[in-house]
Structures are given as structure tokens and as C-alpha cells.
Image (tube, rainbow, N blue to C red):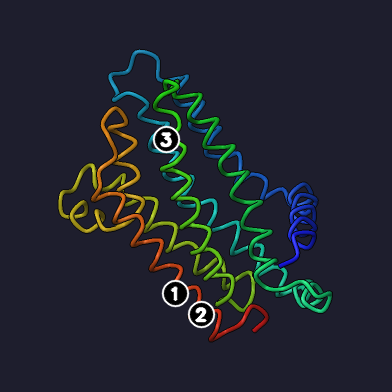
């Protein structure tokens, strides 16, 4: 693996993001909404950090899926991905480049939400760690969609149901016990429940479920990559 290639991909994505305003909006939209609602809540009787916790999970379950799938499908459609491969950039270097770029920017957004929520110094690392797991899993889901989709339109069509399932289940589970029983097997539900009770130690069951989710999406990605290949 050539780290110079990875760094070049990161620089390319930085320039593309500045030109592509919809992608830039995905990075800042949820942190901005969480900040506005938190500061506007005033004396409303809501659970501590209600908007920050809710929107942080929605953020890590929606933004990486949409961003990674859009990047891969767009470059496949335009042919720029094929040009990168012809320039001796390996598929793993490309995935690592766009994945690390999206991961860092999403984690900056998560950090901002943690500061808005006024997490104590001893609780902030746990908040960041839990959401980092969500960003990682969602990024792999986005990569799966990008590999499978033939173009940007197809990628958008596949991303929407994936985002709805992962991001809205924690919110719906607050009102429906049946949904909660189903959602407890998803990483998004476990992350939301853990950050909502941040003063308690991490649940071993929650950690296991998140790790199993990560393993499953990795297996699916490897299978789909071998079947479709990045340029298929």
C-alpha cells in the first residue's frame, strides 16, 4: 500500500467537497440543527442533551452512507475512478483515502455536537468513541452501496432506505416497544441507548452487537467487492 496515493486521494476529496456543495452540506447539516435546537430549547422539560444525542446518531448513520456511496458512484459514472486505477492507485488505497477523509470530517461534526451538549471531559471520549463506531459501520455500508450501484441515481435509491432504517429506528423505538425489540440488534440503536446513559459503564452486550454489525457489513463488502469489483 502506498500512503502517498492515499494522501493524494484525501487531497482530491477535499477539493471536490469544496466544489460539491451538497456533499459539504451533509457534513455540517446535522451538527448545525442539533446546535440550533439545543440552544433554542430553553426551559423545555427534555432529557439531558436530548437533541445532541438524537441528531448525533442520525448524523453518523446517514451522512457517511450518503457521502461514501455518492463519491464512489459519481466517480464510477464519470470515469475518473477508472483513471485512478490506471494511474496505479489500488482499490484499497482509494477506499482508505475517501473513507478516512469522510471519517475525520464526520468526527469533527460529532465533536462539535459533544461540545454543544456540554459533555464533561470524562464522558466526551465515550461519546466520541461510540459515534466513531457508527461512522465506521455506516461508511462501509456506503462503500457497499457505491460498489453495487451502477450510477448516482441508483446509489441514491439504495442509500435512502439504508439511512431510514439505521437512523430512524432509535427515534421510533422510543415510542414503540415492538420496534425497539427489533432495533436492538442494530448498531444505531445500541449507540443511541449508550450515549443516552453516558454516566454508566458501556454495556458489554451493546459492544458485542456493534462489533457483530461491523463484522457483518465487512463480510458483505468483501463479498460484493469480489462479485462486482470497484469498477464494475
**Residue 65 x/y as whole percent:** 52, 58
| Residue that carries the numbered disc 1 in the rendered image | 220
131 w.r.t. 198: above or below? below
Q: Quadrant of the N terminus?
A: bottom right
**Residue 72 x/y as whole percent:** 65, 67
In whole angstroms, how far apart are the C-alphas of marks 2 and 1?
Answer: 6 Å
In the image, 133 versus 106, the foreground residue is 133
| Residue that carries the numbered disc 2 in the rendered image | 224
Give the mark nearer the N terminus: 1 vs 3: 3
Marks 2 and 1 in Cβ contact (< 8 Å): yes
Badge 1 crowding class, 10 Å Cα cut-off, few under 14, some 14 to 19, many 20 or more, is some
What kind of element bears circle 2?
helix
> Which residue is the extreme one toward the front?
1
Residue depicted at x 32% and y 18%: 44
Residue depicted at x 30% and y 39%: 194
What kind of element bears circle 1?
helix
**Residue 57 x/y as whole percent:** 41, 43
Residue depicted at x 67% and y 46%: 24
Residue depicted at x 69% and y 66%: 93
Give the mark nearer the N terminus: 3 vs 2: 3
In the image, 119 versus 7, the foreground residue is 7
Badge 2 crowding class, 10 Å Cα cut-off, few under 14, some 14 to 19, many 20 or more, is some
Q: Quadrant of the C terminus?
A: bottom right
Badge 3 crowding class, 10 Å Cα cut-off, few under 14, some 14 to 19, many 20 or more, is many
In the image, 33 versus 218, the foreground residue is 218
In whole angstroms, how far apart are the C-alphas of marks 1 and 3?
Answer: 27 Å
In whole angstroms, how far apart are the C-alphas of marks 3 and 2?
Answer: 32 Å
| Residue that carries the numbered disc 3 in the rendered image | 127
Amino acid at each position: 500500500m502506498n500512503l502517498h496515493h492515499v494522501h493524494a486521494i484525501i487531497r482530491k476529496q477535499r477539493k471536490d467537497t469544496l466544489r460539491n456543495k451538497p456533499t459539504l452540506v451533509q457534513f455540517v447539516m446535522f451538527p448545525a440543527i442539533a446546535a440550533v435546537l439545543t440552544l433554542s430549547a430553553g426551559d423545555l422539560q427534555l432529557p439531558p442533551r436530548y437533541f445532541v444525542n438524537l441528531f448525533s446518531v442520525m448524523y453518523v448513520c446517514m451522512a457517511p452512507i450518503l457521502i461514501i456511496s455518492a463519491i464512489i458512484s459519481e466517480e464510477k459514472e464519470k470515469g475518473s475512478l477508472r483513471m485512478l486505477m490506471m494511474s496505479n492507485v489500488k482499490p484499497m488505497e482509494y477506499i482508505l483515502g475517501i473513507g478516512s477523509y469522510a471519517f475525520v470530517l464526520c468526527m469533527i461534526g460529532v465533536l462539535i455536537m459533544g461540545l454543544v451538549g456540554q459533555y464533561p471531559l470524562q464522558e466526551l471520549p465515550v461519546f466520541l468513541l461510540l459515534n466513531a463506531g457508527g461512522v465506521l459501520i455506516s461508511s462501509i455500508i456506503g462503500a457497499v452501496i457505491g460498489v453495487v450501484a451502477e450510477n448516482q441515481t441508483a446509489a441514491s435509491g439504495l442509500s435512502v432506505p439504508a439511512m431510514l432504517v439505521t437512523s430512524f429506528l432509535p427515534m421510533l423505538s422510543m415510542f414503540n416497544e415492538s420496534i425497539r425489540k427489533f432495533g436492538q440488534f442494530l448498531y444505531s440503536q445500541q449507540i443511541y441507548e449508550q450515549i443516552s446513559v453516558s454516566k454508566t459503564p458501556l454495556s458489554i452486550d451493546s459492544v458485542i452487537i456493534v462489533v457483530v454489525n461491523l463484522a457483518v457489513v465487512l463480510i458483505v463488502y468483501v463479498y460484493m467487492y469480489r462479485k462486482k469489483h470497484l469498477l464494475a
